[in-house]
Amino acid sequence: MRIARYTTGEDPTYGVVENDGGRLVLAEVQGDPLYQPIVFTGVRTPLDDARLLAPVIPRSKVIGIGKNYADHAAEMGGQAPAEPLMFLKPNTSVIGPGDPIVLPRQSQNVHYEGELAVVIRRICKDVPLERVADVIYGYTVANDVTARDLQRSDGQWSRAKGFDTFCPLGPWIVTDLDARDLALTTRRDGETVQDGRTSQMVHDVAALVVHASAAFTLLPGDVILTGTPAGVGQIVAGQRVEVEIEGIGTLSNPVVTRD
């Protein structure tokens, strides 16, 4: 099931993305399906007539995982850590499909990082490996935008990865997906710059949920970014970044400078 958050010019609402004779439509549901069962309202909107929003706005946190692909760790001049390397992004960094990534004045070297994102279903702590599936609501596409120069100069990653607009999510959440071996592709102005598979993660999704929940209580709607494959690079104003993950879809965002 594909769960989208969208607007047609009024308050945001949620819907299930369905194929209706070859065109995609949004079947509206009551409330937030993360917190209540799916109940359809009967309203159906062509996808082309709606504006997709970030499918989830974490009420608590976005947990990032650094250097979780060996080839990316190598291109950054190191090795993948023995344990998952975690950092936090504020929920104010989250934007949706089509929203602009705004380059901050403080950085001269902002990079894209295409990633698989995990959305947490319910409050949980110290999740055992065999229960991980019970706490995952679904998966979406993410771009862990990073001010690479500030990441290096600060020595820790909060500012470099936490600017407003630095966490695009979308286009929707897929709830019934086997995420163990999905193709992940990032394109910059149509050119493929990242081409990996989720099976190349050093620490897989289950291990990341176990590790994160051992440190933090996870709340419904929390998001875990699972790391990026090799091929990261700089973005500049006027470009567009597309991150596509097999079985989910494509997240596309333009790049602009701050006025």
Image: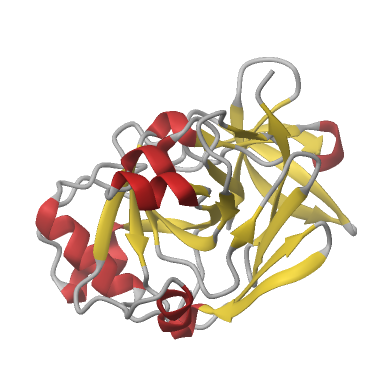
Residue 252 visible somewhere in the drawing: yes
Residue situated furthest top in the rendering: 10
Q: Residue at x 55, y 59 (%)?
A: 113
Q: Residue at x 82, y 56 (%)?
A: 189
Q: Work out whether residue 163 or residue 211 is closer to the camera in this orientation and state it.
A: 163
In this image, 166 relative to 206: left or right?
right
The x, y position of residue 245, in whole percent, is 63, 68
The x, y position of residue 36, in whole percent, is 39, 37
In this image, 65 relative to 243: left or right?
left
Residue 36 visible somewhere in the drawing: no
Q: Residue at x 86, y 39 (%)?
A: 48
Q: Work out whether residue 156 or residue 87 is closer to the camera in this orientation and state it.
A: 156
The x, y position of residue 20, in whole percent, is 84, 53
Based on the displayed image, in which of its 4 quarters is residue 100 positioned? top right
How many numbered badges does the structure rendering display? 0
State the quadrant of the N terminus. bottom right
The x, y position of residue 241, in whole percent, is 71, 53
Relative to residue 83, is residue 35 depicted above or below?
A: above
In this image, 229 relative to 127: left or right?
right
Relative to residue 70, is residue 216 depicted above or below?
A: above
Q: Work out whether residue 259 or residue 210 is closer to the camera in this orientation and state it.
A: 259
State the quadrant of the C terminus. top right
